[in-house]
């Protein structure tokens, strides 16, 4: 070992080979998480994007670490209608696995998840599993800027496979942007701040990684669709709502 | 060059390889000095860039994101990125994030050069 140990090392998740999902409510569709490996931007298929969503908590007397502490405890409560985040843990912490049920239209629900790979007092980071729409790293953070706390979501992501890439090119980017902008607006409202979340997106790599096209075998949308077809009790179930 | 708590030193190894020695903390704030170091390391045509992380004190998730964007740039330009001097902890982090599938990780510079066929 060449580097000295640092107490901050505990901010990182322990090594994870394959994900294990904890207990979730019975209404949740728990698919496409347990047994999956993580899949970051290097393992994805589509163009590589860096997206940054920000909102300034003007008028809110709250420090960055206080915002992140609340965000960790109540993460899913800030999501807009149509998406649910099931957290079988008290708060976001390194090594925890969260379940996502996302309405994708036509009463179809996409089930996937995330691993918390990193968390400190002012930020935390998710990495996605195989089959997720995005092969991604998502970092949630807050910082002080000229006396105002600014909250940010930054995503480094590729579509996981060719089908997802097509979906993203046909409106998926906008849907993703609206999700995180609404989340930040809801988080700001939690602290009595109003304002509009901004978005900036940069294409870092226009090339598609065709060697990863076979990722489609793990496509969570396809697998969730087959699961629904095989379970008639889900045919008339309403979309996830918060 | 020092930015925040990170220091980088560029060291040519041969006509085809160069090393970037990093000490201190690597975070998203390290982007400008790291990318500048990479540009200097490859200015004379080096095809292999070795990150010497033996002096790394700490890297947060922003630092991992930075390594991803550096790696994409390296691959786009037809070069190879390697890392040496990693502690067991950061070897685990690169394995966790699956960066170790694209960054060649070795104990020493000599081993990295040998693996690159130099």
Image: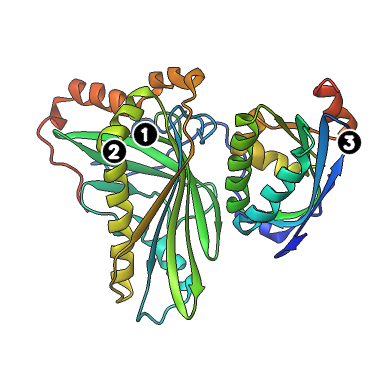
Identify the residue under disc 3.
B13
Task: Please identify the residue farthest to the front as the structure is shown.
Answer: B44
Are dots 1 and 3 on a single chain? no
Check disc 3: other Cα within 10 Å, few if <14, some if 14-19, many if 20+.
some
| Residue A227 spot, x, y in % from top left | 25, 24
Judging from the image, mark 1 belongs to the subunit labelled A
Task: Please identify the residue farthest to the left as the structure is shown.
Answer: A236
Query: Rounded to the nearest whole Å, what is the CA distance between mark 1 and mark 3?
Result: 42 Å
| Residue A208 spot, x, y in % from top left | 46, 26
- Callouts 2 and 1 close, C-beta under 8 Å: yes
Judging from the image, mark 2 belongs to the subunit labelled A
**Mark 2 vs mark 3: in front:** 3
Identify the residue under disc 2.
A172
Tally of numbered tags: 3
Q: Is residue B78 left or right of residue A151?
A: right
Identify the residue under disc 1.
A133
Tag 3 secondary structure = loop
What residue sits 42% from the left and 78% below the top? A62
């Amino acid at each position: 070992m060449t580097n000295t140990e640092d107490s901050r090392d505990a901010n990182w998740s322990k090594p994870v080979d394959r994900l294990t999902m904890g207990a979730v409510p019975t209404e949740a569709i728990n698919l496409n998480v347990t047994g999956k490996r993580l899949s970051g931007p290097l393992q994805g298929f589509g163009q590589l994007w860096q997206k940054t969503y920000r909102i300034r908590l003007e008028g809110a007397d709250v420090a960055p670490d206080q915002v992140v502490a609340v965000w960790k405890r109540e993460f899913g409560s800030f999501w807009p209608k149509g998406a649910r985040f099931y957290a079988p843990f008290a708060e976001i912490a390194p090594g925890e696995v969260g379940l996502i049920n996302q309405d994708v239209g036509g009463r179809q629900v996409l089930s996937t998840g995330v691993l918390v790979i990193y968390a400190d007092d002012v930020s935390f980071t998710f990495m996605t599993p195989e089959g997720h729409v995005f092969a991604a790293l998502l970092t949630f953070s807050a910082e002080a800027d000229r006396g105002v706390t600014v909250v940010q979501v930054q995503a480094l992501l590729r579509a996981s496979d060719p089908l997802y890439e097509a979906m993203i090119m046909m409106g998926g980017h906008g849907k993703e942007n609206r999700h995180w902008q609404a989340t930040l607006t809801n988080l700001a409202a939690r602290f009595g701040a109003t304002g509009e979340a901004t978005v900036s997106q940069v294409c870092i790599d226009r090339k598609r990684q065709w060697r990863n096209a076979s990722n489609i075998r793990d496509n969570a949308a396809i697998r969730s669709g087959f699961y629904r077809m095989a379970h008639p009790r889900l045919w008339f179930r309403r979309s996830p709502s918060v | 060059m020092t930015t925040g708590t990170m220091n980088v030193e560029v060291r040519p190894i041969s006509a085809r390889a160069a090393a970037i020695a990093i000490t201190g903390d690597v975070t998203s704030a390290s982007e400008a000095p790291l990318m500048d170091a990479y540009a200097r390391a490859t200015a004379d045509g080096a095809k292999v860039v070795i990150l010497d992380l033996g002096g790394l004190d700490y890297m947060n998730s922003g630092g991992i994101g930075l390594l991803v964007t550096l790696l994409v740039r390296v691959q786009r330009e037809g070069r190879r990125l390697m890392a040496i001097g990693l502690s067991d902890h950061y070897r685990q982090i690169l394995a966790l994030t699956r960066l170790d599938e694209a960054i060649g990780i070795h104990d020493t510079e000599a081993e990295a050069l040998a693996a690159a066929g130099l």
